[in-house]
Structures are given as C-alpha cells and as structure tokens.
Image: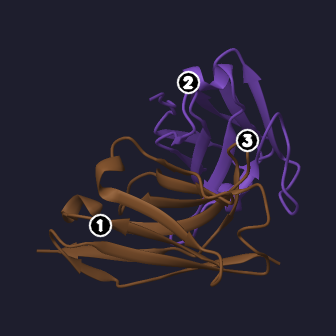
Amino acid sequence: QLQLRESGPGLVKSSETLSLTCSVSGGAISSSTFYWDWIRQPPGKGLEWIASIHSSGTTDYNPSLKSRVTISMDTSKNQFSLKLTSVNAADTAVFYCARQSPLGEVLLWGQGTLVTVSS
Amino acid sequence: SSELTQDPSVSVALGQTVRITCQGDSLRSFYANWYQQKPGQAPVLVIFGKNNRPSGIPDRFSGSISGLTASLTITGAQAEDEADYYCNSRDSGANHLIFGRGTKLTVL
C-alpha cells in the first residue's frame, strides 16, 4: 500500500528557505503516470496547490508561487522535495505531499507537516 | 488561472439530504473532485470523476454536474459527515490544479 510522509523543519525564519521532503513507500515514484504534488493549507484556511512533478520529471507550478518554488525528485531514494525561498509569515501552513492522478483527483495524501515561519 | 467557487457554509438536519456546489469555468473541460476534511486531518477524496467513490466511501455520497456547476450530494447526512468539503479540478488551459475555498458543513 502506497504511503507518503513529509519531513523537514517545523520552524523556518523569515526570508529563509523552506525545504521539505516527501518519502514514498510501497511503490516507485518513477514507474507510474501519476503526478507528485505539494499542497499547503494555512491555519484556518483552504487548500492551495503549490507544485507538481510528473513521474517523467516534468514540473508545474502555481503561478502565484512560481518565482519562489522548486520541486524535484530523487528516484534513487523514492523521494520528492519542495523548496520555497524568501518565506514570510503568510507561508505558515500545513504542507501536504500527495499523489495526483492524470485527471486531477488526489487520492493519496501524506499526514501533513506544520511549518511555521518566525520573524 | 481559473477559480472554483463554493458557498462558505451549509447546514443540514440529521438524516436529510444536502447538496454542496462548486462553480467554475474549468468544469467545462474537467470533472470536479470532492474532498472531506475533518479538523486536524488530511483531506479524504470522497468523489472523483463523473461520479466515482473511492473504496470505503459510503454510497450516501454522490456527485453530479450541470453546466459549470458541480454538486456533491449527501443523502441521509450523518453526524460524522460534519466537516469541510473542498472541490478541485484541473485548470483549463494550464497543467495546474485548482481548489475551491471550501464549504463548512454543519449537521444539526
């Protein structure tokens, strides 16, 4: 059974770079037609898609975050990662890694990790 | 990019039927998917595609679409259905994912 788990610092200082990793178990991220996503949710607010990376390596970014975001994958470790630069308080959120099907549904989610940006 | 519009809140009496809607231009090209999220938990996909339920989702959940408005219907709402519900779809014209702002369902 495929499982996803986020890892990374829970506290990041303002203006620094947020880095998170999603470890995937139960299946290879490179051997499928799925997209691997980062989605965030600020406290008390809704879901926001951040970025996707396809098993082929193709990437897509939310236009509102594109200038600050990089998504990448390491097939040897069966992981994919997120970097968000120049963070500020508005970036405080629960970050989820997830697997998206080609038609856009997200069936599999990690448990989420709260990242707080401190001043 | 496109937007998906949802009502902020909806309420339903226990055992009654409730419809939660999601409107957007992207629904001209893509189906809406629906997620249930309870406090402190990750979202759970409850309806995807035309009207498909993942394994383990009760059949009281169903989906439909009329024009540019997708609906999630809960027939015979239960207390455990009280949650936030989000719709999403692909963004037409771009390989992006978009989410509605969510609807808080209260079961009275």
Give the residue displayed 29% in from the left and 66% down from the top: A92
The chain holding disc 2 is: B
In the image, which lettered chain appears purple? B
Where's residue B66, x and y in %? 73, 17
Separation (CA) of disc 1 from disc 2: 28 Å
Q: Identify the mark at residue A103; answer none if there is no mark.
A: 3
Chain rendered brown: A
Identity, as a three-letter code, of the amino acid under mark 3: Leu
Q: Quadrant of the N terminus of chain A?
A: bottom right
Residue at position x 59%, y 48% from top? B85
In the shown orientation, is residue A93 left or right of residue B34?
A: left
Mark closest to the chain's N terminus, 1 or 3:
1
Q: Amino acid at mark 1?
A: Thr
Against A82, is B34 above or below? above
Circle nearer the viewer, 1 or 3: 3
Separation of disc 1 and disc 3 at Cα?
29 Å
- Please state which of the two labelled residues, at mark 2 or mark 3, is closer to the viewer: 3
Q: Nearer the viewer, residue B46 or A14?
A: A14
Q: Residue B29, how many percent across, how many down?
A: 68, 23
State the separation of the CA atoms marked 2 and 3. 16 Å
Element under disc 2: loop
- Circle 3 SS class: loop
User: Which residue is under mark 2?
Assistant: B24
Q: Nearer the viewer, residue A36 or B58?
A: A36
Task: Measuring from the top left, give residue A49's x and y in whole percent.
Answer: 48, 51
Subunit under mark 3: A
Q: Quadrant of residue A108?
A: bottom right
